[in-house]
Amino acid sequence: MLTHTQSFNRLKKEQQEILDFAVLVCHAIPNIKKTIRGEEEGIPYFSLANPDYFSKEAEDRIKKLSKHYKENLSKYLIISSFSFFEAYFKAVIEEMMDFHGGKESLINNVKERHKRMLETIDDTVILDKRKLQEPPKRKNKMRYEKHISQLQQNASYRMPSELFAAIGAKYILDLVSSDRFRSAMIPDLLEYGFLMDLNSKINKSHDLREKNLKETFDSMRDIRNRISHGDNPTIDFAKAMDYVRFLRNFAIKIDKHLIEHFFVLESSSI
């Protein structure tokens, strides 16, 4: 049995590399500042090492560059972690399609199974169905409820809304595989396409504590877009780290949900 998808394992590695880089920067900048102070105070053995790839800058410029490093690092954490998550979502859907033999195979499985059910309706189903094939009348409410309940309990019958499953599967899989896909679509695809509950609240920071999964994702996407469009928002480092943790936990929830309900073989053809 799968515990995590390959897509999640890649995301986990990428997210860890982001955090490792943040740790490195948060160690390096204070030490650079300490070294510059030591040089300025004439303490022996305090001198800046030559940088990789760049010419050594004047200390005044290094001090200026390091002044707002937390704000800049916060922006880069938001952009990179969100991009990796967006790539994960597309990759995990493609991995699910491959699990089922490819997109066309998965869509065809849904379509053919529902078609077979349309063609093999037994007499008891027909009797209940006929009672529901009339314009609704309030006086017949209890009778409708009885026959609806009996149809819903019959494993050989699909209600009209369920028959849209094939077009729903085709739309979702075609969309995620296309250039039309946008990250803004992820919450609705999860909620309505994959029936995932997005109401849980998993954040710890004060600003995000009351936001559920969808609200937090939309909030982070908005900040990512503002950064990308040059609006230059100020982002607290602690809040940026909370967004990074949120995406990790969100991905864990998505992966668990998809494995439990959608990584289930429907065909023995391999």
Image (tube, helix red, strand yellow):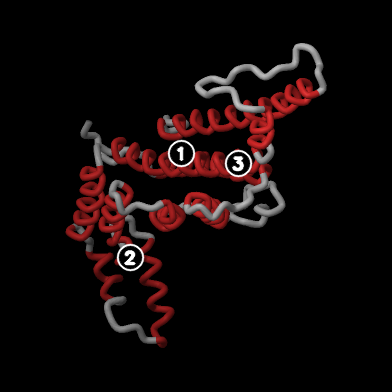
Position in image of residue 115 (x %, y %)? 20, 56
Q: Residue at x 27, y 65 (%)?
A: 124
Comparing marks 3 and 1, which lies closer to the viewer? 3
Position in image of residue 113 (x %, y %)? 23, 51
Q: Quadrant of residue 46?
A: top right
Looking at marks 3 and 2 on the same chain, the residue that comes earlier in the sequence is marked by 3
Q: Mark 2: which amino acid? A: Ser
Q: Which residue is mark 1?
A: 84
Q: Nearer the viewer, residue 72 or 139?
A: 72
Q: Farthest residue toward the top?
A: 45
Q: Residues within 10 Å of mark 1 (few under 14, many from 20)?
A: some
Q: CA distance from mark 3 to mark 1?
A: 18 Å
**Secondary element type, mark 3:** helix
Looking at marks 1 and 2 on the same chain, the residue that comes earlier in the sequence is marked by 1
Q: Left or right: where does residue 81 sit relative to residue 132?
A: right
Q: CA distance from mark 3 to mark 2?
A: 49 Å
Quarter of the image with the C terminus in it: top left
Q: Which residue is mark 3?
A: 72
- Mark linked to residue 60: none
- Mark linked to residue 161: 2
Q: Residues within 10 Å of mark 3 (few under 14, many from 20)?
A: some
**Secondary element type, mark 2:** helix
Q: Are marks 1 and 2 in contact (CB under 8 Å)?
A: no
Q: Mark 1: which amino acid? A: Phe
| Residue 198 visible in rendering | no
Q: Residue at x 62, y 44 (%)?
A: 240
Q: CA distance from mark 1 to mark 2?
A: 35 Å
**Secondary element type, mark 1:** helix
Q: Mark 3: which amino acid? A: Asn
Q: Residue at x 42, y 39 (%)?
A: 88
Comparing marks 1 and 2, which lies closer to the viewer? 1
Position in image of residue 135 (x %, y %)? 30, 84
